[in-house]
Image (cartoon, helix red, strand yellow):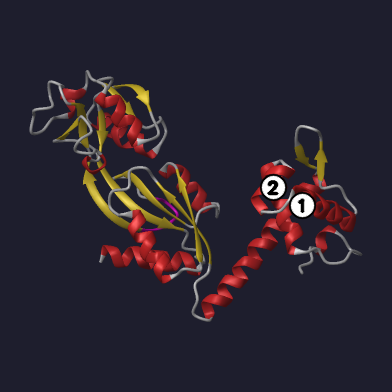
Amino acid sequence: MLVIEAMYEHHECVELQQMRYAVAVAEERSFTKAAERCFVVQSALSHQIKALERELGVQLFARTSRRVELTAAGKAFVAAAREALQATERAMVDAAAADGEVRGTLTIGVIPTVTAIDVPRVLAEFHAAHPAVRVRLRGGGSEQFVSDIRAGQLDVAFLGLAECTPPEGLAFRKLSHEALAVALPANHHLAHRKCVKLEELADETFVDFPSGSAGRAQGDLAFESAGLQRDVAFEAMTTDLIIGLIRNELAVGLLSAHVVPHDSGVVVVPLVDGPRRVEYLAWNEFNPSPATRAFIGTVADRRG
């Protein structure tokens, strides 16, 4: 049992499970989805929320037939409840770690272009060593992962950044350093070449990652540094889509040669003066969890 004394003066203890339910309803904005998330029937969850509201003497949620919204009191309670739940989980995790067992939840961000590490294999080794840790994988872009780590929403992430832009304000380990290549349709007039210069691609139509993303910045910076402009007519968030557009002769792209399958119908040609990309494992150096430290160690062991 845990007490949030700031919410009330004369009430009894609020149960941790009630806090979890309230946070789930707030995040899902639905009693039905919150119940599914918490693996309980909706009637039981609703009963606990009503009991919590009676205990606090305030209404936490404004309910309509179509949606659920937090009241002002609800926003204050849920913010405090999140902190209390996080503190409780961390206390349990740290106690277990002190006894030699790594527990808790590890949230990992993985960009779609990781080539330096075989992520599934690393996770298999990590799970074998620390079976009590629950792992949550999130896909996305490097720039969002950097923000999420700073905000405490991610524990650790695999990043891919331009050579001149290391992750600021984070602890990191450099995993690889490589030059991007140009990916071309198989029948492109440059596909037979041993190497290509950026200036030879200035008139091509490109597909790339979305504008403003770290993946896009690598190519943009290279062309800008060379005093060249390019036409990015297609944007996609996954390498599969980018490769598909190239294969169908809609565009060319700048990619790591390691992410293009040999039988993809796409030819990869080295760039003489192309952008260079660095892959990192990054985390918040302020009080990382035992699970985070253990995962960093597993990656370090793989890299030697």
Q: Secondary structure at mark 1?
A: helix
Q: Amino acid at mark 1?
A: Leu
Quadrant containing the C terminus is bottom left
The residue that label 2 is drawn on is 34
Q: Secondary structure at mark 2?
A: helix
Q: Is residue 243 left or right of residue 7?
A: left
Q: In the displayed structure, would residue 113 be above or below residue 289?
A: above
The residue that label 1 is drawn on is 45
- In the rendered structure, does residue 271 fall within the stretch colored magenta? no
Give the CA separation, mark 2 to mark 1. 8 Å
Q: In the displayed structure, would residue 148 be above or below residue 15?
A: above
- Which disc number belongs to residue 55? none
Q: Position of residue 227 (x, y in %)?
A: 24, 26
Q: Are marks 2 and 1 in contact (CB under 8 Å)?
A: yes
Q: Amino acid at mark 2?
A: Ala
Q: Which residues are magenta?
A: 167-172
Q: Quadrant of residue 252?
A: top left
Quadrant containing the N terminus is bottom right
Q: Is residue 13 left or right of residue 133?
A: right
Q: Is residue 263 left or right of residue 18?
A: left
Front residue of 274 and 19: 19
Which of the two discs, 2 and 1, labels the residue nearer the N terminus? Answer: 2
